[in-house]
Amino acid sequence: MKNQIILWLSSLVIVFVIGYIKNVTDKDYPITSTFGIEGKKVSYKLDKISYNKSSYKNVIISDIEGLKGKLIWIKDDVRHETAYKEIERGLECEIPRLRAGQNIKYKVILNYRDKFYEIPAQDYVTLTFWGNIPSPVNILDFIFLYGGLLMSIRCLLELFNKSMNLKKFSVMTCALFIGLVTIISPLKNSYKLGAINHFVPQLTDLIEPALILILFLWIVGSVFIFNKKYTTSVTILITSITVLSFFFL
């Protein structure tokens, strides 16, 4: 019992670390930073993707009175300017929502006492708009995706427990990835593409190639595990590929 608790806790910690690394290294991870103006902090977040139902809202957090700013954004080579309005702790502005898959380039220019601060200092940030995904769908996607990753890691660590429950864990892993590939991921991508009640997307747009690879490997790997052939090598191989493929999702 003690070994089981240790192995489960270890699996959770490993999954947490993998998830954290994936998030902070993801190409769509927002640009965030804090800088000072006359000893007071100004914090900002420049998103690279938007799933908002209506408009994209950008907020600058600061306690500086008199801070002003505008958001410069470019769509189809046409330059637009949207002024920030003051809120309780900073500034806020909104950009009209575009169709799923469309994008703009934008930057922030702040002004305080005749001094200008351009964020980012060079070039623009690309913001891509996607369809709004309902919270229940996002929750299910999280449960199945990270649940599958957790069970993959748990299968690997079960090798230290003489593979006593490896067959059961491999079946659970397959079940999670089957549900993710056949139901959850296509549903999420349908909302992301704005296809619900509008059009029928292509199958290749609904299914993630990395998930197909993971599912295929676990089905094949489970056959080897159940037949007790190359159990250790197969488990290490498919778990390693699962973790690596996770970073392409």
Image (cartoon, rainbow, N blue to C red):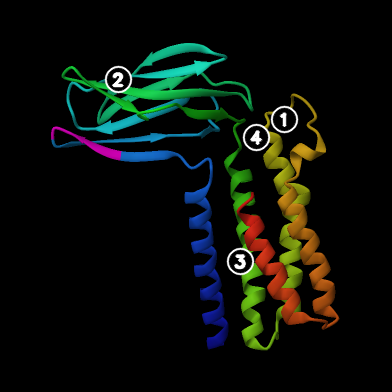
Q: Residue at x 66, y 56 (%)?
A: 245
Amino acid type of the residue that numbered disc 4 sits on in the rendered structure: Lys
For marks 2 and 1 on the same chain, the one whose residue lies earlier in the sequence: 2
Secondary element at tag 4: helix
For marks 2 and 4 on the same chain, the one whose residue lies earlier in the sequence: 2
Q: Mark 2 points at which residue?
A: 69
**Res 239 → quadrant:** bottom right
In this picture, residue 159 sits left or right of residue 178: left
Disc 1, disc 3: CB below 8 Å?
no
Given the current orientation, which residue lies at the most extreme front position? 122
Secondary element at tag 1: loop
**Res 81 → quadrant:** top left
For marks 1 and 3 on the same chain, the one whose residue lies earlier in the sequence: 3
In this picture, residue 190 sits left or right of residue 57: right
Between residue 196 and residue 18, name the one nearer to us: 18
Amino acid type of the residue that numbered disc 2 sits on in the rendered structure: Gly
Q: Does the magenta stretch include residue 35?
A: yes
Given the current orientation, which residue lies at the most extreme left position? 38
What separation in Å lies between label 2 and label 4 (alpha carbons)?
31 Å
Picture coordinates of residue 193 (x, y %)? 68, 31
Question: Badge 2 local density, few (<14 within 10 Å), some, or many (20+)?
Answer: many
What separation in Å lies between label 1 and label 3 (alpha carbons)?
31 Å
Q: Name the residue under label 3.
A: 150
Q: Name the residue under label 4.
A: 192
Picture coordinates of residue 238 (x, y %)? 72, 68
What separation in Å lies between label 2 and label 1 (alpha carbons)?
37 Å
Disc 2, disc 1: CB below 8 Å?
no
Say the numbered circle drawn on residue 196. 1
Q: Residue at x 61, y 24 (%)?
A: 102
For marks 3 and 2 on the same chain, the one whose residue lies earlier in the sequence: 2
